[in-house]
Image (spheres, helix red, strand yellow):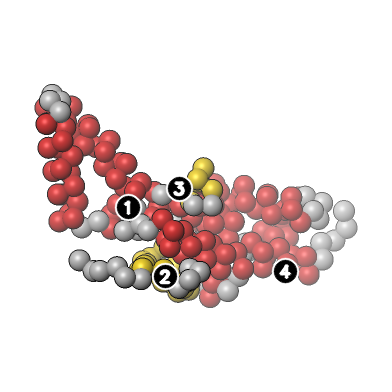
C-alpha cells in the first residue's frame, strides 16, 4: 500500500470525528479500505469511550425535531467538546436520532439522577405498599422495590430506554458508541417535549 492521500484522511475525519493521526493510522492499518478503517476506529474508540466521559463537553447543538403533522415537537441540548465535531454529520445524525426517539418514546428524565427525590419517593412508597399488600415478607420487600424501580427507570429515563429504531440497543449504549466513533465526550444535557393539547401539571 502506498502513501495514504490527505484527502482520504480528511474524508475519514469528517465521517467519524476522530483525530487526523488516528484516521491516517486507521487507513494505513487497513490498506486504505475506508469501511474497514471506520470499523477499526470504532473498535479502538469503544475501549476509550469511558475515559472520554470525564472530559468537559461545553460545545454542541440544540436539536429541534417536529414530528409529521406538527403535533409533537422536541428540543434537546446535546453537548460535545468542540465546535468542529458539533458540525459533523455523525454528531448531527446522533442528535437527530435522540430527538426523534424522545418524540416517540416520551421519556420524562435524562437519567435516574435527574429524578428529584420528591418525585421518586412516592413511586418507591407505592411499590413498597404493593409488595406488602401481596403479603411479601419484609426482608424481600426492598429487593422487590429495587426490581420495580429498575423497570420504572426503563420507562421514564431516556438513557435507559431501548432505541425506537433498534430495540437491541439502549440510548445509553448508543451514546457510548457515538463517543467512541466520534472521538469526543458527548452529553445529552436536557430536553423538552411538547404534544399538542397536553396540559402541564
Please rate how many residues cluster around mark 4, counting C-alpha atoms within 10 Å: few if below 14, some from 14 to 19, many from 20: some
Tell me, yes or no, if residue 80 can be seen here. Answer: no
- The numbered mark, 1 or 3, whose residue comes first in the sequence reads 1
Mark 1 vs mark 4, CA separation in Å: 40 Å
Residue indicated by mark 3: 162
Disc nearest the viewer among 4 and 2: 2
Return the residue nearer the eye: 49 or 117: 117
In the picture, the disc for residue 71 is 2
The percent position of residue 134, horizontal first and vertical second, equals 15, 28
Mark positioned earlier in the residue sequence (4 or 2): 4
Q: Residue 10 carries which label?
A: 4
Whether residue 113 appears in this view of the structure is yes
Residue 175 placed where, x, y %?
48, 55
Q: What element carries label 3?
A: strand
Q: Earlier in the sequence, mark 1 or mark 2?
A: 2
Mark closest to the chain's N terminus, 2 or 3:
2
Residue at the spot 82% in from the left edge and 51% down from the top edge:
31
User: Which mark, by number, is residue 156?
Assistant: 1
Q: How far apart are marks 4 and 3 (CA)?
A: 33 Å
| Disc nearest the viewer among 1 and 4 | 1
Secondary element under disc 1, as helix, strand or loop, is helix
Seen from the viewer's position, the closer of residues 32 and 132 is 132
- Image quarter of the C terminus: bottom left
| Tag 2 and tag 3, C-beta contact below 8 Å | no
At which x and y percent is residue 199? 25, 69
Q: To which quarter of the image does residue 143 belong?
A: top left
Left or right, residue 50 beside residue 153: right
Q: Which residue is drawn at 58% across and 60% down?
A: 182
Which element is circle 2 on? loop
Is disc 1 surrounded by few (<14), some (14 to 19) or many (20+) residues within 10 Å?
some
Chain-order first, disc 4 or disc 3: 4
Amino acid at each position: 500500500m502506498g502513501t495514504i492521500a490527505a484527502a482520504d484522511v480528511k474524508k475519514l475525519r469528517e465521517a467519524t470525528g476522530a483525530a487526523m493521526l488516528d484516521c491516517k493510522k486507521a487507513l494505513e492499518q487497513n490498506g486504505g479500505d475506508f469501511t474497514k478503517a471506520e470499523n477499526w476506529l470504532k473498535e479502538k474508540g469503544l475501549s476509550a469511550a469511558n475515559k472520554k466521559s470525564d472530559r468537559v463537553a461545553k460545545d454542541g447543538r440544540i436539536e429541534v425535531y417536529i414530528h409529521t403533522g406538527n403535533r409533537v415537537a422536541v428540543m434537546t441540548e446535546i453537548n460535545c467538546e468542540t465546535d468542529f465535531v458539533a458540525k459533523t454529520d455523525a454528531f448531527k445524525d446522533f442528535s437527530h436520532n435522540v430527538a426523534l426517539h424522545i418524540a416517540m418514546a416520551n421519556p420524562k428524565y435524562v437519567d435516574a439522577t435527574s429524578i428529584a427525590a420528591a418525585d421518586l419517593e412516592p413511586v418507591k412508597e407505592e411499590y413498597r405498599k404493593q409488595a406488602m399488600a401481596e403479603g411479601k415478607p419484609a426482608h424481600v420487600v426492598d429487593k422487590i422495590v429495587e426490581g420495580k424501580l429498575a423497570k420504572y427507570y426503563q420507562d421514564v429515563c431516556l438513557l435507559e430506554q431501548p432505541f425506537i429504531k433498534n430495540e437491541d440497543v439502549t440510548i445509553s449504549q448508543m451514546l457510548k458508541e457515538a463517543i467512541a466513533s466520534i472521538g469526543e465526550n458527548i452529553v445529552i444535557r436536557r430536553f423538552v417535549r411538547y404534544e399538542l393539547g397536553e396540559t402541564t401539571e
